[in-house]
Amino acid sequence: MGHVVAAVVYAKGKKVTDIALDEGISWATKPGHFVWIGLHDPAKEELLNLQKQFNLHALAIDDALTQHTRPKLETFGDALFMVVYSPIVTDGELQFIETQLFAGEGYVISARYGESPSYARVRQRCEAQPLMLEHGEDFVLYALLSFVIENYRPLMEKINDELEELEQKVLNNPLTQVDVEQIQGMRRNLLRIRRYIAPMLEICQELQQLDFPFIDKHMRPYFRDISIHVKRVLEDLTGLREMADHAIEVGLLVESSRQSVVQRKFAAWAAILAFPTAIAGIYGMNFNNMPELTWHYGYYGILGIIVVGCGGLFANFKRMGWL
């Protein structure tokens, strides 16, 4: 069962009073007043109550009850319905928490599902700016959307730090299966973030163009400001994906370089061992006409040639950096 986080009436940029949920429409219809209602995990009965009071469109309520849609903005007459998502990390798992916004002449309703950051801070910020809050519903919408975008910034910084640390790690150590899985997990999360943040750009652009009674033309630059922040997040996402790809590429290049070093060492030792093997093979052919076989110092001479030859090869490969 959900609960009402706050239901407050505002007029001329200041808080008038707290109200019960059933009193919303009576205050929203008063000139110069608007109602801001915040819900957490609202039940069906609460949404139907608000639908009856504020004449919310049936399709908007159906979407609200269904949940788990993508971010979107829909208009119904002179009212709008918006779905946005805030990211949270729980036990190392990235999740996106849905928030539904209903707005019209005299009211703003936010319905938050799950344990995303509370919008109480948004309310405090707005109440601390009475000149801006005097704009009414459109400023509240701006503040809520701005807060949603702010929630992505710490997550992006965290992913950036993890990628930098992982990139440094693969430079000093061989790329392991765990590293590959970690990088792939980050790339997957970045794609999920893009899926939920990219539609926000279109939403902000639509808000700049809507001709609604409760959206002041002087507030449109503020929605443009949000779209600028969204573009920056998208640019950062592109950069982070390139970092993830680069980490894998660097890891593969470093691993290839390590394998090349090992292969050179094997080749060098194989060449050194091939020299005495070739000499031993010659004297193992059992030909009769091999006069050095009867030489008194032949054994010691051959050993000397082997030592000198192998030593020369070793020194040469060492100079070349193969050993």
Image (cartoon, grey):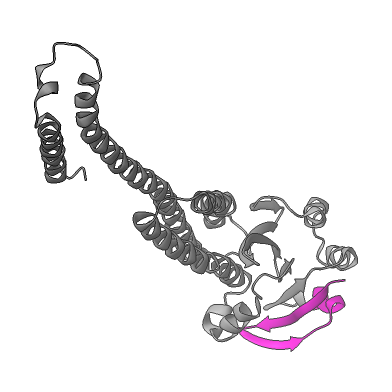
Nearest the eye: 56 or 273: 273
**301 left or right, relative to 229:** left
x and y, in percent, of residue 71 in the image? 64, 53
Q: Residue furthest right?
A: 45
- Compared to residue 291, the image places residue 62 above or below, namely below
**280 left or right, relative to 213:** left
Magenta stretch encompasses residue 271 = no
**Magenta span:** 1-26
**200 left or right, relative to 42:** left
**290 left or right, relative to 186:** left
x and y, in percent, of residue 265 in the image? 27, 41
Magenta stretch encompasses residue 15 = yes
* Residue 185 showing in the rendered view: yes
Nearest the eye: 120 or 171: 171
Q: Quadrant of the C terminus?
A: top left
Total number of numbered discs in the rendering: 0
x and y, in percent, of residue 264 in the image? 26, 38
Q: Quadrant of the N terminus?
A: bottom right
- The quadrant where residue 89 appears: bottom right
Nearest the eye: 213 or 159: 159
Nearest the eye: 312 or 146: 312
Q: Residue at x 9, y 25 (%)?
A: 295
x and y, in percent, of residue 289 in the image? 14, 11
- Compared to residue 184, the image places residue 159 above or below, namely below
* Residue 214 showing in the rendered view: no
